[in-house]
């Protein structure tokens, strides 16, 4: 292992328009002790050739070409290649880094720290009022969408990674980042370090997977199966997440829920009972009935209650 060496891992797929700017931003870092690993995940456009051209110019760049296997396998392959690195960070190939990003992350990686993350991404997340955070609290904030669950904007010790880190079904295309971060943070012996400086430039564009993703009960079931080990510590957050997903799929409307009777629906009902989760009788009835008339009455009552609650909050 080379002390201080950061492995910067970039999965590459269908990013011909963005990859050059991404690479340039990494090469321009004020912290220069890094290995840039570009994993061409069978991209059908010219992005792979662009990577090869850059590798000819800078010895810090390694390009790996592989058959398309998905972003999780691409990251795993990059980590394997970075076996001489002390630290690992990830960058999406359509994003860029501020010049001081690696320097800022490395400075926060003290001798007793294994995992560094930023609480600032485009000012979207609220500031965390501490410089250290227990792993269990970080996981809770991810579920509550108050810190980024993405792999970027973070620095990890290479030793945290093992065969289980990326043991994630390829069918999971939304949330695989959170699973990785749950597993890595779960291995930390000490608190995580929080930095309050932006170390990442996220590029919003029409091709972002988050803009095109359509959730399904099967996808949510696969996701749950990967985080089930954290259920004892995070049961409230996980149930709240499932209820939010349920509501987004007509769960509290008069329509028959699309997820009714699926495995994830059964798990939700089981865990509400098992962990004595505080849910209202009205909401629970909407979780368990398919009778159209009953659902219509219950959904109308629920909407009226929410309106009254909103008016009270405005008055206060």
Image: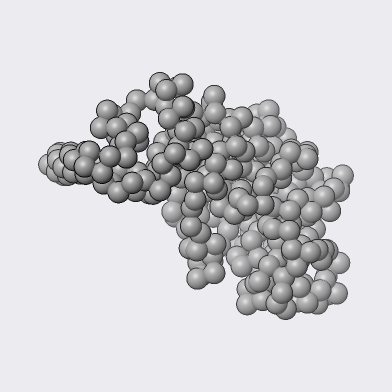
Q: Dividing the image into 4 quarters, which one contains the C terminus? A: top left
Q: Nearer the viewer, residue 241 or 85?
A: 241
Scheme of colours in the image: one colour
Q: Residue at x 48, y 63 (%)?
A: 211
Image spot of residue 15 (x, y percent): 65, 72
Q: In this rendering, does residue 3 appear at all?
A: yes
Image spot of residue 124 (x, y percent): 43, 53
Image spot of residue 140 (x, y percent): 50, 35
Quarter holding residue 36: bottom right
Q: Is residue 47 above or below residue 164?
A: below
Q: Dividing the image into 4 quarters, which one contains the N terminus? A: top right
Image spot of residue 96 (x, y percent): 61, 65
Quarter holding residue 75: bottom right
**Relative to residue 107, is residue 131 drawn left or right?**
left
**Relative to residue 28, is residue 202 drawn left or right?**
left
Q: Nearer the viewer, residue 32 or 279?
A: 279
Q: Residue at x 56, y 38 (%)?
A: 224
């Amino acid at each position: 292992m080379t002390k201080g060496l950061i492995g910067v891992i970039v999965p590459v797929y269908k990013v011909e328009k963005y990859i050059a700017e991404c690479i340039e931003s990494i090469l321009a870092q004020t912290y220069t002790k890094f290995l840039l690993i570009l994993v061409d995940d069978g991209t059908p456009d010219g992005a792979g050739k662009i990577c090869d051209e850059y590798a000819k110019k800078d010895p810090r760049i390694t390009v790996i070409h592989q058959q398309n296997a998905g972003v999780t396998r691409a990251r795993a392959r990059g980590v394997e290649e970075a076996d001489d690195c002390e630290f690992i960070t990830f960058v999406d190939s359509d994003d860029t880094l501020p010049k001081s990003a690696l320097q800022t992350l490395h400075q926060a990686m003290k001798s007793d720290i294994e995992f560094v993350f930023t609480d600032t991404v485009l000012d979207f997340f609220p500031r965390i009022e501490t410089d250290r955070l227990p792993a269990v609290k970080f996981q809770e904030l991810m579920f509550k969408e108050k810190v980024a669950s993405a792999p970027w904007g973070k620095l990890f010790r290479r030793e945290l990674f093992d065969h289980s880190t990326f043991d994630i079904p390829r069918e999971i295309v939304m949330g695989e980042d959170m699973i990785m971060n749950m597993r890595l943070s779960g291995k930390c012996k000490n608190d995580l370090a929080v930095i309050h400086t932006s170390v990442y430039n996220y590029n919003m564009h029409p091709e972002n997977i988050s803009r095109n993703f359509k959730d399904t009960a099967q996808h949510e079931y696969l996701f749950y199966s990967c985080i089930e080990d954290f259920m004892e510590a995070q049961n409230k957050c996980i149930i709240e997440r499932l209820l939010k997903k349920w509501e987004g799929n007509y769960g509290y409307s008069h329509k028959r829920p699309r997820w009714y009777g699926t495995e994830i629906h059964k798990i939700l009902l089981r865990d509400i009972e098992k962990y004595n989760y505080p849910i209202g009788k009205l909401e629970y009835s909407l979780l368990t009935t398919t009778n159209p008339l009953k659902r219509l009455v219950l959904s109308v009552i629920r909407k009226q209650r929410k309106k009254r609650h909103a008016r009270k909050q405005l008055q206060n």
